[in-house]
Image: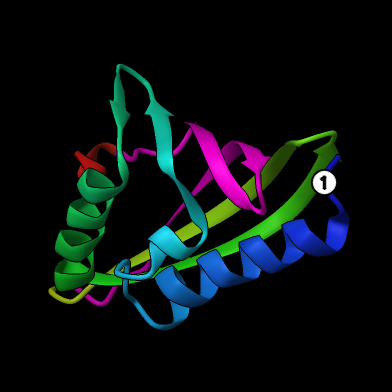
Amino acid sequence: MVGKKQVKELLEREIEELSIKQTAENLDEILTDDWVVHLPGVDLRIEEVKKGYRKRFAEGRISDLVEDLIISGDMVVARWTNRFTPHTTGIEVCSSSISIDKIRDGKFAESWYIGSDKSWLK
């Protein structure tokens, strides 16, 4: 069973790293060693995701916001608003996604993303 406080802290850390600091280097601190993210048609590991984020940070600014959160046992479902502002245009592009995360030992152990175009992570 995962507590709301623990989930909130993990999500705040994820947002701090990716949206505020614009870095993916410390993701291993909130992800298990065997973490995998399932995107439509592909599964990615930590280093592949870090590479995708580094590329995206070079292209523009990411800003994510959790709109809704549901916790059940060791599973967490979040509805996100994703914002990306390319350096070239400065025009913000918004999309929405749903993430489903399994938590183990205080870290994200497995994730599924549905909705937003995350093809840039590949």
Residue at x 15% of width, y 68% of height: 59
Q: Quadrant of the N terminus?
A: top right
What are the residue bounds of the magenta stretch? 89-118
Residue at x 52% of width, y 65% of height: 14
Q: Tell me where residue 52 appears, x and y as whole percent.
A: 20, 52
Indicate yes or no whether the magenta region holds residue 110: yes
Q: Tell me where residue 91 appears, x and y as whole percent.
A: 30, 71
Please say whether residue 47 is visible from this viewpoint.
yes
Bin the neighbour count of mark 1 within 10 Å (Cα to Cα): few under 14, some 14-19, many 20 and up: some
Q: Is residue 113 left or right of residue 98?
A: left
What secondary structure is the stretch in magenta mostly built from? strand
Q: Is residue 90 left or right of residue 104?
A: left
For residue 17, what is the image quadrant?
bottom left
Q: Tell me where residue 80 appears, x and y as whole percent.
A: 60, 51
Indicate yes or no whether the magenta region holds residue 102: yes
Residue type (three-letter) at the residue carrying disc 1:
Val
Q: Secondary structure beneath disc 1?
A: loop
